[in-house]
Image (spheres, coloured by chain):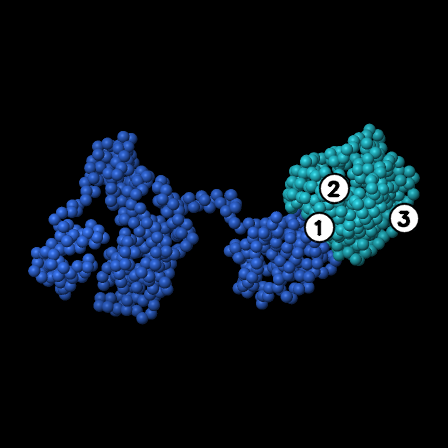
């Protein structure tokens, strides 16, 4: 049987009374122990030293009406009982030093007595579980001077225990989740669970989020939705600033991101704020964050950690507070290993990482996405577009089969629906439209790089099987061409001239050999090694 | 195991208290279900819990369900131990009720006992001390034991703080009696007591009594007491006849005129005097249990409440006796225990 322990402050006004007629008044602390249906085993009475006499009187009275109750005195000193910090600290220290035994006791915190400030503090400390307790609110009897103990209300702050409130929360959560998913009733369990997590984090945290996954998986779409949800919840007021880091490489990158002062460099006729400042109080979405140069990475790290950074040419730091979402289709861990991405920056943005699966990994979501695209098309064109029953079955069968690669993911879905809608006679997508589209899709998914065996053998010779497996097909194709050019050239400079023939015309300084050397170095290759294998 | 339905009859705490008393006297274990089921706050309240714990202490009982608001209780009594007991009772007023639960066992125990009870001694929802001392105990003593009650200090609702002592010399067995006639009235007395309140209240109450019951001046007395923590007021009218002394009580309450307090006692007294029956409504209810234990008794009461009917049903579950009620008479009810 658990003991019930009340923790309550002595009410210097409400509990006051030394004369015999004190029993005619409602005294909250006394009233707690007067209820026939509540047995209080222990009362932790908190009061300031100057109220010792009253505490003694109240204790004596409790003993008389409730001999079952053991009253313990606790002195808490405030300089000012209306000073929030003072009172909070006092109550906090009490809670901190008190030995709560929740396995054997049930605790209630009485909040009817004390200043409003102390009531607020007790509420906050109970809500934060520093007091592992329920709240107790007492009030006088309806009939004045009636000797009745009045009301005794226990309030449990665990909102999940209230069906009605829990239902509302669930409804709101469903609505938010629906919003994040653009109203698409996705079916994939893993994807849905991930979206639930994202919804929770969006609402409960301001930490950076990292979205990874193949191109077209919906990273920037999701980032936009996260921003809008945060904005709806009034968590951020500023704008959403989107940057694709791949587009801001080179000299202007620093000033694009962090701004510059007037005259910071040649051509800087006016000052520029920079995207980070624009995102102040809002959200910054850095897509393709793996493409950021080393200097920008350093500055960004500082901007995230300290909320301040130096604009180009400025001698005073600029401040900006923003939520950060990063997107990448690269393996950033690998980028760190290769020395292309700062480890500390990754650690900072990698707090919440979500890998958005490609469409091929969640084929059960293809149908709802097709429905979504159809409804979007109808909305945007003002023209109803439907599938024929037969055509729908045919298309879905193909779309969900292993034959459909969906290599550009949602971009593919979007494009193909667009095409079919355009081709649909009077808004009906027919069997023949579907047939044509399937053919078109199949063609577009045919791997353009058919690996030439001879060429592959050359690379195999130079790099070895193990090394080749670590390199993307994307890079292999380029490397193969570069190596072939090298074979046909007599020197590094000649090969460089051939390889950079087009861009060298526009350049002021030319160092093609150096460019080629650096490129080869990425694969741990050099001119000598290649020449030796030829 | 004997199972008692706690919501039968008036369905209050008395079924529980009487079950405890009878269980200890007979050594019969019982389980009571649906305790106070129909009430606004069902289950065991503090005062009931106190009674259960007092009973448990006196006979070393094995108890399951003795928790606040519990609606089911199992009580397996051990041997009743005479001795010195002290009970502190909260929420002023349940002291006499706790005594009801333990007294029958102690008057049949193996030795002398002293019970001290602290708390409320005069509460509108329980038999006041004066009634037990002057009406109930003398009749109980007529059955064999010697019980003496002494008030040390008054305790009024809500402050409590009262105390009384009960000295018990037990009897080997109880002997029943007949109480069919009142006989002549030999003494009348009205007493008004105020605690921590103006004496004027007591005087006003007595004035009304004097007038309405035509009491002479030497039949009234008032007292002002200051040794109790809270305020309180009580007025009692004693009617002593050849066969017993009946006590009628009015309780002072905040917002209630002294005259109204006196009137309540007067009305009860007038009703009692009008009928010829010796046993008043409250006494009928109280005396039934020990008389049923004693066996072979008969009494004539002014009125039978639902409390008493519930009590009759309960008593017959624990005891091997038959109780018949004859309510065909014009001036009251005859209850016969065989």
User: Horizontal and vertical percent for residue A31?
Assistant: 66, 53
**Horizontal arrangement in the rendering, residue B290 relative to residue A469 (left or right):** right
- Residue found at the very far top of the displayed protein: B328
Q: Residue at x 34, y 59 (%)?
A: A347
Instruction: Give the residue at mark 3.
Output: B219
Q: Colour of chain B?
A: cyan
Q: Which quadrant holds the C terminus of chain A?
A: bottom left
Disc 1: CA contacts within 10 A as few (<14), some (14-19) or many (>=20): many
Q: How many marks?
A: 3
Callout 2: residue from which chain?
B
**In the image shown, does A308 or A189 lie closer to the viewer?**
A189
Q: Which one is in front in this view, the residue at disc 2 or the one at disc 1?
A: 2
Label 2: element kind: helix
Colour chain A appears in: blue
Q: Are marks 3 and 1 in contact (CB under 8 Å)?
A: no
User: Is residue A498 rendered to the left or right of residue B189?
Assistant: left
Q: Which residue is mark 2?
A: B24
Q: What chain does badge 3 belong to?
A: B
Where in the figure is residue B6, as x and y percent of width and height? 68, 37
């Amino acid at each position: 049987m658990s003991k019930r322990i009340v923790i309550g402050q002595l009410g210097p006004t409400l509990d006051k009374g030394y004369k015999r007629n004190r029993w005619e008044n409602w005294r909250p602390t006394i009233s707690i122990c007067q209820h026939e249906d509540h047995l209080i085993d222990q009362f932790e009475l908190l009061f300031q030293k100057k109220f010792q006499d009253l505490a003694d009187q109240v204790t004596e009275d409790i003993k008389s009406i409730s001999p079952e109750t053991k009253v313990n005195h606790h002195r808490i000193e405030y300089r000012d009982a209306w000073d929030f910090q003072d009172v909070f600290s006092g109550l906090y220290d009490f809670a901190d030093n008190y030995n709560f035994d929740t396995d054997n006791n049930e605790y209630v915190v009485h909040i009817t007595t004390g200043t409003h400030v102390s009531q607020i503090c007790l509420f906050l400390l109970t809500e934060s579980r520093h007091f592992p307790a329920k709240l107790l609110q007492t009030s006088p009897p309806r009939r004045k001077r009636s000797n009745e103990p009045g009301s005794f209300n226990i309030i449990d702050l665990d909102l999940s225990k209230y069906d009605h409130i829990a239902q509302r929360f669930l409804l709101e959560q469903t609505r938010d989740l629906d919003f994040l998913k653009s109203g698409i009733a996705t079916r994939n369990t893993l994807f849905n669970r991930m979206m639930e997590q994202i919804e929770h984090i969006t609402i409960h945290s301001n930490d950076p989020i990292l979205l990874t996954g193949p191109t077209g998986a919906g990273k920037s779409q999701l980032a936009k939705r996260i921003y809008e949800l945060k904005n709806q919840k009034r968590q951020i007021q500023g704008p959403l600033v989107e940057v694709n880091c791949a587009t801001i490489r080179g000299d202007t990158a620093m000033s694009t991101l962090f701004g510059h002062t007037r005259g910071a460099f040649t051509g800087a006729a006016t000052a520029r704020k920079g995207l980070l400042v624009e995102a102040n109080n809002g959200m910054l979405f850095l897509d393709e964050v793996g493409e950021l140069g080393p200097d920008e990475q350093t500055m960004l790290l500082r901007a995230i950690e300290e909320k301040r950074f130096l604009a180009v040419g400025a001698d005073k730091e600029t401040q900006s507070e923003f939520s950060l979402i990063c997107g990448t289709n690269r393996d950033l861990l690998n980028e760190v290993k290769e020395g292309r991405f700062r480890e500390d920056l990754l650690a900072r943005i990698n707090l919440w990482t979500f890998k958005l699966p490609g469409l091929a990994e969640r084929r059960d979501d293809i149908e709802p996405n097709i429905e979504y695209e159809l409804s979007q098309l109808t909305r945007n064109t003002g023209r109803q577009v439907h599938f024929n029953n037969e055509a729908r079955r045919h298309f879905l069968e193909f779309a969900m089969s292993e034959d459909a690669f969906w290599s550009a993911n949602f971009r593919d879905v979007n494009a193909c629906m667009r095409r079919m809608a355009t081709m649909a006679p009077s808004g009906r997508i027919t069997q023949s439209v579907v047939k044509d589209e399937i053919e078109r899709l199949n063609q577009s998914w045919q791997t353009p790089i058919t690996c030439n065996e001879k060429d592959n053998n050359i690379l195999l010779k130079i790099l070895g099987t193990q090394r080749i497996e670590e390199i993307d097909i994307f890079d292999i194709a380029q490397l193969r061409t570069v190596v072939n050019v090298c074979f046909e050239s007599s020197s590094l400079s000649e090969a460089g001239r051939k390889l950079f023939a087009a861009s060298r015309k526009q350049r002021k300084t030319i160092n093609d050999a150096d460019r080629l050397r650096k490129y080869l170095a990425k694969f741990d290759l050099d001119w000598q090694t290649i020449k030796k294998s030829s | 195991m004997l199972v008692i339905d706690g919501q039968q009859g008036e369905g209050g705490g008395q079924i529980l208290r009487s079950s405890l008393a009878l269980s200890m006297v007979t050594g019969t274990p019982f389980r009571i279900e649906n305790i106070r089921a129909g009430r606004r706050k069902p289950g065991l309240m503090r005062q009931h819990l106190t009674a259960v714990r007092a009973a448990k202490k006196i006979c070393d009982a094995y108890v399951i369900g003795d928790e606040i608001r519990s609606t089911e209780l199992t009580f397996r009594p051990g041997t009743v131990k005479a001795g010195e007991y002290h009970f502190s009772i909260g929420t002023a007023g349940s002291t006499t009720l706790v005594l009801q639960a333990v007294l029958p066992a102690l008057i049949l125990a193996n030795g002398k006992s002293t019970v001290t009870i602290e708390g409320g001694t005069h509460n509108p929802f329980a038999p006041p001390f004066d009634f037990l001392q002057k009406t109930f105990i003398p009749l109980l003593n007529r059955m064999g034991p010697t019980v003496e009650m002494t008030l040390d200090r008054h305790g009024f609702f809500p402050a409590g703080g009262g105390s009384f002592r009960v000295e018990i010399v037990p009897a080997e067995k109880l002997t029943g009696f007949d109480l069919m006639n009142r006989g002549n009235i030999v003494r009348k007395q009205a007493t008004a007591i105020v605690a921590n309140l103006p004496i004027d209240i007591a005087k006003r109450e007595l004035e009304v009594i004097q007038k309405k019951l035509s009491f002479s001046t030497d039949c009234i007395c008032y007292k002002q007491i200051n040794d109790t923590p809270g305020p309180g007021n009580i007025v009692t009218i004693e009617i002593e006849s050849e066969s017993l002394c009946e006590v009628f009580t009015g309780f002072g309450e905040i917002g209630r005129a002294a005259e109204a307090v006196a009137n309540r006692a007067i009305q009860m007294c007038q009703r009692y005097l009008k009928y010829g029956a010796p046993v008043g409504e409250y006494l009928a209810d109280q005396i039934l249990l020990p008389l049923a234990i004693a066996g072979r008794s008969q009494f004539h009461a002014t009125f039978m409440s639902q409390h008493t009917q519930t009590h009759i049903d309960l008593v017959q579950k624990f005891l091997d006796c038959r109780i018949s009620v004859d309510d065909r008479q014009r001036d009251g009810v005859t209850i016969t225990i065989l």
